Image (cartoon, helix red, strand yellow):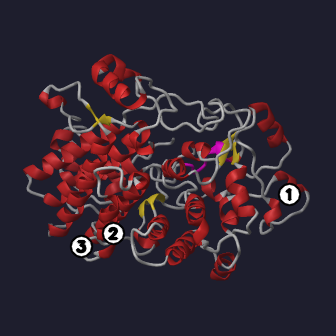
Amino acid sequence: MKKLQYTIFTLCALFLFSACDFEEYQDDPNRITEATPELILTNLIVNSFNIVDVTPMLTSRMLVYTDGLDLNQYYGWTRSDFTAYNNLRQVYKLKEEAERLEQPHYIALGNFFSAYHFYNLTMTFGDIPYSEALQGFESNYTPVYDGQEAIFTGILQELEEANNGLAAADAEISGDVLFGGDVIKWRKAINSFRLRILMALSEKEGASNIDIKEQFERIVANPSIYPLMESNEDDLALPYYDVAGNRYPYFENQNLTAAYLMEQTFVNLMKDNADPRLFAIGSITEEAQSNGLQPDDFAAYGGLDGSVTFDELNLQRAAGIGSLVNERYYTDPTVEPGVIMSYAELQFILAEAASLGWISGNPSDFYTSGIQANMEFYNIPQEQIDTYLASAFALYNPSKAKEKINTQKYLTYFFTGGWESYYNQRRTGVPVFSVGEGTLNGDSVPKRWMYPESESNTNQANLENALDRQYNGNDNINGLMWLLK
């Protein structure tokens, strides 16, 4: 993925840093030991939240790749990596410097970023180094792997401390390129993210030591203590600017003009149900252009099957029946922010919680608010939104609550949310991801990634203990982590 590089000049010009003095960087601009918390925070935000990427969209049956056999699309992946620990080292430094300078608001933000990265790591692998992670300064280079239940317990506590710490702090957050130092918006994002994690644990409600339902209910019932996102303006999202190095990651990306096409699972959910978001997300097919169809005709759009053999996929591509993504994604340098978590997603989380009896409220109201919010994200006219909401497909059905809610939730993740679309489908089975003749993992969608090879060389004993505890000693992509058992 094209990496976002915020230069010092751009930061000063765009984000109006207080005391953004170039002399601070002349001695040794790379010496992190002298960085102040606000500069570490800026770097941490950009490195953590620049997540716009086609890879999870291939896995989640939103896109297909036609210029080669992509292992993410064909479920043939093997290992992932521990690069998130690089960001966690920055988190450690942020908290260390904040403590030294007596700036507790940065410690609170550090707790959030710690929870964010450890959440993604455990969702990728299962058990990971957590309690003993980042202790190289104490000469501990072989950290134990904590059980996943303990990890979730820990990160939920970190989020509690993050919210409480920001609530108690009376200081400006400098270096904040996300919310401009708005403490309330940070707290809304932190508490909403905590609800995401609690919903990810839904299958463990009543079967773990974590008070999942009780935490969820307490947060929702106490908005003065735990403020939540209230509109799209509260989205946890990284903005892009029309300045070199700060543009949308796929601006002028040639692969989006030819190699990546839309997958039928995603397209058909919109095309078959007259969903106007399709017009903002896709482009009409070559076949439709030849037949004179217009961009506002649902028949003009189509998706390819990402699970057929590569040869068959290219026959479909040559037939001109697949849509490319909308050209705005590669022609507009500020097309949309990189959304990590949206208000729309929160509404679907609340809808599912209400349907499970975790909170009071009408699931239909939360569900409808989620659709409305995502439509507004794409600037869909209200008349079209109302028409869609009145359709049989969009109407909430209590007897199909899980399917209805999570189908709409899935539709919000196009170029947003990182791997959350995959994680949520892994939990719910909604929608069904195709596993045709081309897939490389039999008839199954993988459940995880294997650990980095480097762990076998540097931390073998602890790795083997973790594998024995979770997967009967076998490190494979189909193993069921604690979360899924």
* Residue drawn at 57 percent across, 58 percent down: 410
In this figure, which residue is indicated by the disc labeled 3? 225
The C terminus - image quarter: top left
Residue ranking furthest to the right:
291
Answer with mark 1 or mark 3, whichever residue precedes in sequence: 3
Disc 1 residue crowd, few under 14, some 14–19, many 20+, Cα 10 Å: few
Residue 111 can be seen, yes or no = yes
* Residue drawn at 83 percent across, 47 percent down: 320
Q: Give the percent coordinates (x, y) of residue 50.
A: 43, 49
Amino acid of disc 2: Glu
Q: Quadrant of residue 281?
A: bottom right
* Residue drawn at 29 percent across, 66 percent down: 187
Amino acid of disc 1: Gln
Task: Using residue 163 as the reference point, say whether residue 243 is left or right of it.
Answer: right
Secondary structure of the residue carrying tag 2 is: helix
Q: Is residue 374 above or below residue 41?
A: below
Answer with mark 2 or mark 1, whichever residue precedes in sequence: 2
Amino acid of disc 3: Ile
In this figure, which residue is indicated by the disc labeled 2? 217
Q: CA distance from mark 2 to mark 1?
A: 51 Å
Task: Using residue 457 as the reference point, say whether residue 283 is left or right of it.
Answer: right
User: Bounds of the magenta span?
Assistant: 250-256
In this figure, which residue is indicated by the disc labeled 1? 289
